Amino acid sequence: MSRFAYRKGRLHAEDADIGTIAAEIDTPFFLYASGAIEDAYREFASAVAGLDSEICYAVKANGNVAVIATLARMGAGADIVSEGELHRAIAAGVPADRIVFAGVGKTGAEMKVALEIGIRQFNVESDQELALLDRVAQDMGRRATVALRINPDVDARTHAKISTGKAENKFGIEPERACELYAAMRNMRGIAIGGIAVHIGSQLMDIAPYRAAFARVADLTGDLIAAGIPIQSVDLGGGLGINYGKDPAPSLTDYADAVRDTVAPLGLPIVFEPGRRLVGEAGILVTRVIYVKQGRERTFLIVDAAMNDLIRPALYDAYHPIVPVLEPAAGAPVAPVDVVGPICESGDVLAVQRSLPAVEPGALLAIGSCGAYGAVMASGYNARLTAPEIMVRGGSHAIVKPRPGHEFIIGQDRLPDWIDRPAVARNRVVA
């Protein structure tokens, strides 16, 4: 059930009127429906019920502490890929022993912090990373629990920039090297063998690549166990896609069936790491039309949101649904428009030739499915202030990340000694 719907001609998030929120909080802003996050978690948990499993939310999808905390209170652990995400997960109340540290470029300093905090597991992606983790753990008098992330060379049939499970991708370890590295781990005083891991990409809309990857990992796990390697768990990553307004999301039942048919017979605990599937459809980006510009061949809706707020369309040619916050009259005519932002880049386009009803400057639009890879990928390009983040529960709303002020942003810069600070300060370049 969608938590976003028109009521008496006005778009609501749960019981909160989005237009009323926009009158209080300047656009653009991200808005998350906490009920939608909870619904998505329950749906995922229900699909994998009966499996010996743990759901670790992929923090990279949306790192807002309120979002992580909402899921932590539902019982989720966390999948993190940096020290910053580790601190966010802890701040949100995720128990340390339910945190999995993934990513190809962990530094020694990050490893040390994670070991001090006492996380559940490191998903290791190279022999060099394994050697460094061993040294760091030994220096601390600790043992790091490790799962090797396997690259199964499976085409996820998703966008090339979010595919992670093919041989040419930077992620994971070749299956043929797994036995060698697991054997080496037995002699590493700073390493404890934990499990095996796989993650083949993001926004997958087809279950077949999962089934192929899971089958390969299950076969490899069986071989490792037969060779005396004490594999304790299987981490299946995440990547399940959502409906961005074009194609229906893949069935969670079909996904769980693929797991039951391939990995579950091993009898090992399973870790799932969904991100987008839990939060993607729970968020929107609310923006206001600045101008309606008629070009020679196209009409442009110039809005106050931009590629610095939502980079997915520019980066991936991604499609996001867009609707007016005031419901159009039934049968209102539509026409193709390009929805563009104010950034000085031709690539600052949020939608191309999108059929929308006529709107005037000042009208509010809601860009859908922005709960994942929206605010978390934002930047301050063109010295734009990043959009605030709002969370709704029922009819109440709260600012869960405020919009920074210009003085705060500029105040992060520092002048070298050879620039005349008093002269610059008089011109208010620095607060």
Image (cartoon, grey):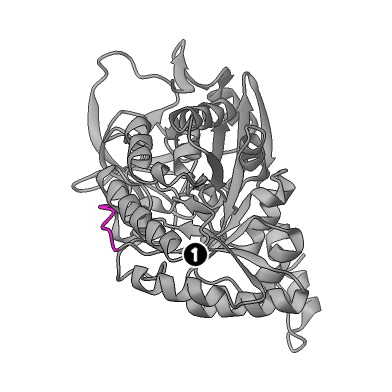
Figure check: 385 above or below 51: below
Query: Is residue 136 at least partly visible in the picture?
Result: yes
**Name of the residue lying farthest toward the right:** 422
Predominant SS along the magenta part? loop
Residues 76 and 413: in front is 76
Q: Does the magenta segment cover residue 150?
A: no
Q: Quadrant of residue 390?
A: top right
Q: Tell me which residue sits at (64%, 55%) in the image.
A: 120
Query: Is residue 304 at least partly visible in the picture?
Result: no
Query: Where does label 1 land, which residue?
Result: 229
Q: Tell me which residue sits at (27%, 35%) in the image.
A: 246
Which quarter of the image is occupied by the N terminus?
A: top left
Q: Quadrant of residue 37?
A: top right
Three-letter amino acid code of the residue under disc 1: Ile
Query: In this rendering, would 144 be left or right of 150?
Result: right
Which quarter of the image is occupied by the C terminus?
A: bottom right
> Where in the figure is residue 84, as x and y percent of width and height?
65, 60
Figure check: 313 above or below 321: below
Q: Which residues are magenta?
A: 153-158
Q: Quadrant of residue 6?
A: top left
**Name of the residue lying farthest toward the top:** 8
Figure check: 215 above or below 14: below
> Where in the figure is residue 409, as x and y percent of width and height?
68, 61
